[in-house]
């Protein structure tokens, strides 16, 4: 039986989010209906809404959902009605990377999550007035009071943890944390630099503070965010508007450079500066996404000292184990996401977008 619900629809590229009644298809064999309690707002949502990616519009976005399972399709085994869940990306479950524990690099990742707007079989999960809408965004399209969610997007979590406090784990937080834990893997006495102190960058700072790294440097242009970075574990901060990045990192590290850098800004100029600031055998993780087709020039000889530049999607996380571990850290106060979150009623999604765009709120979370 199909379900009518209220969703935030983007009618066309550059249009605002507008609340509208939509119809969910009945759950397929590997899908569940989830009543949303909260959903994080991410820059990826805004990029798609602006027309920066060829997602079919009109459509429903949202990919950091958290809620309660209401119904499941016939072959769903991982969750049951009443379970609390965090919603993350989906994947095919069949390709080499999925089998190898790297579902963020699924062979079908782009059409299943970001570009297709439909299930893998081409059918639509959402409609309005009998016409299909773009949906299945990250297997969820969670800017809605109820969502039809792909089973591989569902992660069962501890029901004692408030869902609004953990909704951002589905994308931004696991990306920042995974950049540090899954790629950089700081060793004792290491140096981690985080370029950009937004939600992803500050998540990386918090993650680095839980490693043996002894020097954690946050870089941004906003004084308030640098102050927050210090409170969350940064040992040093650099105001990029006042100091040259390479010189500042050299001074802090005694000329050695950074062992690991997380680049979250999406600026190719900042990326280049970060690579130049690496120590021998250092690694820079590319997280920030500039427009498609962007290129950056690197000093090839500068790379010969063992430097590595690694691209990253969603923290290279295996969500079924990674997200519950993060939930436990939130529960114990060791990953204080509440310092990043500002909550907004679903009806105020326009204000949430405005506040994130202006920088007033680091991580808006919509509540239902």
Image: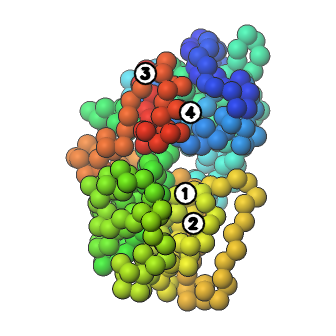
Give the position of the C terminus as an image quadrant: top left
Q: Secondary structure at mark 3?
A: strand
Disc 1 from disc 4: Cα separation: 21 Å
Mark 4 closeness class: few <14, some 14–19, many ≥20 residues within 10 Å: many
Task: Tell me the quarter of the picture where residue 271 sits.
Answer: bottom right
- Residue at the spot of label 1: 265
Say if mark 1 contacts mark 2, CB within 8 Å: yes
Is residue 315 something one can see in this rendering?
A: no
Image location (x, y in percent) of residue 191: 37, 75
* Label 4, label 2: how far apart the Cα atoms are: 28 Å
Q: From the top left corner, tell me how far across and down residue 101 is, in percent.
A: 53, 58
Single out the mark in the foreground, 4 or 2.
2
Classify 167 as above or below 326: above
The label shown at residue 62 is 4
Q: CA–CA distance between discs 1 and 3?
A: 28 Å
Q: In whole angstroms, how far apart are the C-alphas of marks 3 and 2?
A: 35 Å
Mark before the other along the chain sequence, 3 or 2 = 2
For the image, the number of numbered tags is 4
Q: Work out whether mark 1 precedes mark 4 in sequence or the reverse, and give the earlier one.
A: 4
**Residue 345 visible in the snapshot:** yes
Q: Residue furthest left?
A: 332
Q: Which residue, given by chain and number where applicable, does mark 2 sit on? A: 270
**Measured from the top left, where is residue 321 in percent x and y?**
41, 51
Q: Residue at x 71, y 43 (%)?
A: 52
Q: Is residue 362 above or below residue 27?
A: below
Of callouts 4 and 2, which one flags the residue occurring earlier in the amino acid sequence? 4
């Amino acid at each position: 039986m199909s379900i009518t619900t209220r969703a935030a629809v983007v009618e066309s590229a550059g249009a605002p989010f507008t609340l509208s009644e939509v119809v969910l298809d009945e759950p397929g064999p590997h899908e569940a209906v989830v009543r949303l309690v909260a959903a994080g707002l991410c820059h990826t949502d805004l990029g798609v809404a602006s027309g920066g990616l060829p997602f079919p519009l009109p459509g429903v976005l949202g990919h950091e959902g958290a809620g309660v399972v209401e119904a499941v399709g016939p072959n769903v085994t991982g969750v049951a009605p009443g379970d609390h869940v965090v919603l993350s990306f989906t994947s095919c479950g069949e390709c080499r990377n999925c089998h190898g524990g790297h579902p963020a690099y699924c062979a079908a990742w782009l059409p299943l999550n970001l570009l297709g707007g439909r299930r893998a079989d081409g059918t639509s999960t959402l409609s309005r007035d009998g016409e299909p809408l773009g949906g299945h965004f990250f297997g969820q399209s969670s800017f809605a009071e109820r969502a039809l969610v792909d089973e591989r997007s569902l992660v069962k979590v501890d029901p004692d943890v408030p869902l609004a406090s953990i909704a951002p784990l589905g994308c931004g937080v696991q990306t920042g944390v995974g950049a540090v834990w899954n790629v950089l893997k700081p060793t004792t006495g290491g140096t981690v630099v985080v370029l950009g102190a937004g939600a992803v960058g500050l998540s990386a700072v918090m993650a680095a503070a839980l490693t043996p790294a002894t020097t954690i440097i946050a870089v941004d242009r906003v004084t308030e965010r640098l102050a927050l970075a210090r409170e969350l574990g940064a040992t040093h901060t650099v105001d990029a508007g006042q100091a040259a990045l390479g010189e500042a990192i050299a001074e802090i590290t005694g000329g050695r450079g950074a062992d690991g850098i997380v680049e979250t800004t999406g600026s190719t100029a900042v990326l280049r500066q970060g690579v130049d600031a690496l120590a021998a055998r250092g690694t820079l993780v590319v997280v920030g996404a500039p427009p498609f087709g962007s290129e950056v020039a690197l000093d090839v000889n500068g790379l010969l000292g063992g430097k590595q530049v690694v691209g990253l999607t969603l923290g290279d996380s295996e969500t079924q184990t990674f997200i519950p571990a993060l939930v436990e850290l939130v529960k114990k106060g060791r990953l204080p996401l509440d310092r990043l979150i500002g909550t907004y009623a679903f009806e105020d999604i326009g204000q949430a977008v405005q506040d994130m765009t202006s920088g007033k709120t680091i991580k808006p979370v919509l509540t239902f």
